[in-house]
Image: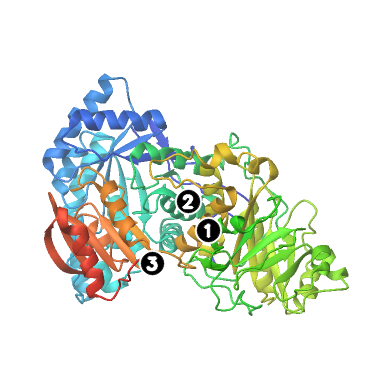
Amino acid sequence: MQLYCNSLTKYSRLKTKEVKIGDLLLGNLHPIRVQTMTTTDTMDTIATVEQSIRCIEAGAELIRITAPSKKEAENLLNIKNELRKRGYTTPLIADIHFTPNAAEIAARIVEKVRVNPGNYVDKKKFEQIEYTDAEYVEEIDRIRERFTPLIKICKEYGTAMRIGTNHGSLSDRIMSRYGDTAMGMVESAMEFLRIARGENYHNIILSMKSSNPQVMVQAYRLLIQQMDAEFGECYPLHLGVTEAGDGEDGRVKSAAGIGTLLEDGIGDTIRVSLTEDPEFEIPVCKDLVKRYSVDGGRLRVDGNIPIINNIPYSPFEYKRRGTFAVDNIGAKHVPVVIADLSKIEKITTNSLQNVGYTYDAATDKWNISDAAADYIFTGHQIIDFALPGTLKVIVYPATWALISDKEKYFPIFDTVGFEEAEQKSDMINFVMIDCFNDETPINDFTYLDEIANDKTVVFCLSSTNKHAMPSVRRMLMELIDRKIDNPVILICDSHWQTADEHLIHYSTECGALLLDGFGDGVCLGMIEESYKLQDSSFKNASGRNYVRNNSVEQFLNNTAFNILQATRTRISKTEYISCPSCGRTLFDLQETTGKIRSRTNHLKGVKIAIMGCIVNGPGEMADADFGYVGSGVGKITLYKGKEVMKKNIDSETAVDELINLLKENDAWIEPS
């Protein structure tokens, strides 16, 4: 199978064409650029300028501003002039959707325009239309006629362009032929790219955004493969997970999607779309990017990971690796969460509250949350109180040998310890493997076969290799090649210091593997030095809507469940598909998202979209069960799936009407 990156085992940036955006060079192995988008009214020049300055001073290298009509496009000149007068030369991007005439105005003013091929010429009415080949060609000709004037203006003015496909806003024409697929996203962009190349215009960046990280990752990989096959070269890529949401949820979902691609050297510029003030997006972007720089201290270097020539799975579609079950791990069981409590000096009932178990002393009963860890690792410590009925404990072999309760406690070995152990569990034996560290024999995998003969074995894969995720992925490929079907726990330790850095690290390392169908469970931990920084790290995280945590253990447990939720591998709570707001937004998005979340966050598995305007609304919320979309100033339209249910509701009563809609469709339960 043709690779979608330079290598799956050695870190190497994908070389793309060089694009000039004002004085900024992007692609062609230049540094990965970070950007954001303003949320102010574009007609409010001073507010937009001042918000842009806050973003620039936070580290933004590109600023995007919405231009939904001619008047906003024309006002970009006032915004640009005011920024330049104040000494800021950061390139500006005009965000265009339905209005080619606005794009043509903006392209004469700013350094870059973004067009969405799903709605720049085509219209989306959610209609299924069958096209003959001849009719399809006619539609392409219509696009060429409408798109070419913008290309010529961009060539004349030296303006760059992003062809930005959004999963939820694919045109009816593309949907009719390709369906709601990653390949449809790719073809939507390729149609525009072919027209641009025909005009000898190459100052182009592309993006494949989705609110679903699985779809997003697959689409970028397919796009690279398609460009390489068709043109023999790749254009720069702008990475992002659209409508990611806010707080920890938005950061985890963004890092899982963006980080998965960055790990393989893919991506030339990134934007993290949070439902927060745009300056809060920049630190998240910087935390993602610095993992691949010398300054980050963990520069991806060539380790001793064996080269892989044939990928034994498809990176373009999600399929979970097949395993047999060991108790509740593997096969068709949802991935388990193992909480590391080994650094707690004395584990008490209160300790378990941080991992989802609350003890009521008056009734002598446990309350178990939807985000309760399935196992706890206690190291050498034996719990001296009765455990909740569903919770199991992992300990070191010497400690396990002393315990009489072999139904609740299970040993964890290293490979040598397991082979030499005289006493093993009849139910579950966890076996740790440090994948391709400096001491791992590169081509000696015979020990894997010997261990795998025991059907009680669950592999626990981690790596101290600086190129850790590909090390674990390479070991998983080896398991597939050798037809070893034992379930696998992904163990990820962090060396970083702040909550933000840890969150990005875990989401990238585990998210990348889970999105490729690897992993039957996760266990997050951190090195001793990082653990000791808990007071400063976890209670002072950045971002207005960031969740504060009482302890490292609570943070790790929440993060594990958030990663599983973001990768769609285990659903434990309500999912919110929430746009990051922009000048088109017709209500206070942050406030409204908070209201909706506070009243619906107990609806496990329900997906609710909260969209600021009609541009992103019906399309990007197509993956949601219910939608809350701005349709006019102070007016809301409610959706069930893609169907309009209630139109032009007053925003003062719209949240109540959303609750009524949930009740009418049997999606509501009363909070406990």
Secondary structure type for disc 1? helix
Give the residue at the far front of this rendering.
362
**Which numbered disc covers residue 511?**
1
Secondary structure type for disc 3? loop
Tell whether label 2 touches label 3 (CB within 8 Å).
no
326 relative to 642, above or below: below
Picture coordinates of residue 477, whole percent (x, y): 64, 67
**Which numbered disc covers residue 349?**
none
> Which amino acid type is shown beneath numbered disc 2?
Ala
Alpha-carbon neighbours of circle 3 within 10 Å: few (<14), some, or many (≥20)? few
Q: CA distance from mark 1 to mark 2?
A: 8 Å
Picture coordinates of residue 7, whole percent (x, y): 59, 55
Tell whether label 2 touches label 1 (CB within 8 Å).
yes
Residue at screen point 49% across, 68% down: 569
> Which amino acid type is shown beneath numbered disc 3?
Ser
39 relative to 135, above or below: above
Picture coordinates of residue 300, whole percent (x, y): 62, 45
Secondary structure type for disc 2? helix
> Which amino acid type is shown beneath numbered disc 1?
Gly
Q: Tell me if residue 9 can be seen.
A: no
| Mark 3 or 2, nearer chain start | 2
Residue 544: quarter of image: top left
Give the number of the mark in front: 1 or 3. 3
